[in-house]
Image (tube, rainbow, N blue to C red):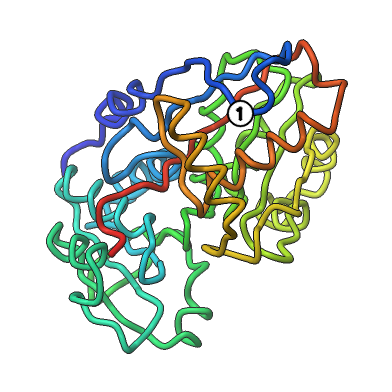
Amino acid sequence: MSQFNLEILDEYLKKSILHEFKIQSVNDSNIKLFVKRDDLIHSEFSGNKLRKLKYNLKSCFDNQCEGILTFGGAFSNHLLAVASACNLLNLKSVGVVRGEELTKYSNGLISRCAALGMELLFVTRYEYFTQKKATGRIDFRGSSFWSVPEGGANSEGIIGSQEIVSNLDFDYVVVAQGTSTTSLGIALNLKDWQKLIVVPVLKGFDALGEMKNLLRDDEKFSKVQHKIIVLDDFHFGGYAKGTNELNLFIEEFNSLNNFRIEPVYTGKAMYALKEFIESNKFIENKKVLFVHTGGLNNYSE
């Protein structure tokens, strides 16, 4: 196996730019709103997906593995990102998919993963639950693979996520929260005066608890916990659920700005940011960074 060069992936990460944007109803405030456009990184491994994969791919090469084995549901952008990145780097990819009733023809995303060369294993929900957190070098059918947990939630994913805010001086950083990997990475790289606003998209999600468990270092987490603000009332019913109010907000936002948000992750986080600004005077005259974690693809049907 040839030696892995991080510069291959860094060229894609350089596509993420910063620019100002507006939110309807708060345009007259003195707050400076900026977006980190990780959605521009790539059409298939965009957003925070490549951030979480970067050092997992490096570990795959460093451990002389043949490819990446990972986990995801029927509409997992993470599966698509792994399939696409491995295809780019001439690595094998294996996707363990939740739902034994599925096939590679079940939807456009799964079909695209198969077209990119990913071997798909459709398993029961129980099997999936017992396997989805596997991380590190494993044996798969007589070959060595690097196992990446569901959503890229491991130490390599955290390290990659830290780079999102490297050398960026903002008072507040806002991010949608799924597995908590990205939010934890950002929190670990903030200066003492900076705050991170996390918006869980799952109903009943223990944001701080999940971040603490993922870090596996209570003392280290206690040093960053004070920087984290959790807005956990903006799940709009749960993962991938929404309301007319949310949809109307997203539609209006997308008509006002030159980038798009969607209803699963970024739309909920942006709505939460709007509400936070309207409810807190102390954010006046501050600089806010919204991290666009992607979420848009052409294979959702």
Q: Which of 141 and 275 is in front in this view?
A: 275
Q: Relative to 143, is 39 on the left or the right?
A: right
- Residue 150 falls left or right of residue 274: left
Residue at left offset 42%, top offset 36%: 260
- Image quadrant for the C terminus? bottom left
- Across and down, in percent, residue 143 comes to 23, 68
Q: Which residue is painted at 51% across and 37% down in the image?
A: 252
In this view, the residue in front, 293 or 20, is 20
Mark 1, secondary structure of its residue: loop
- In the image, is 293 to the left or to the right of 189? left
User: For mark 1, does the 10 Å Cα neighbourhood hold few (<14), some (14 to 19), or many (20 or more) residues?
Assistant: few
Judge by depth and name the residue closer to the eye, 178 or 219.
178
38 up-or-down from 49: above or below: above
Where does label 1 land, which residue?
24
User: Amino acid type of disc 1?
Assistant: Gln
- In this rendering, the answer to whether 133 lies above or below 51 is below
Q: Where is residue 66 in the image (x, y as percent from the top left)?
A: 22, 57
In terms of image quadrants, where is residue 233?
bottom right
- Residue 51 position within the rendered picture, expressed as x and y whole percent measured from the top left: 43, 38
255 and 134: which one is in front? Answer: 255
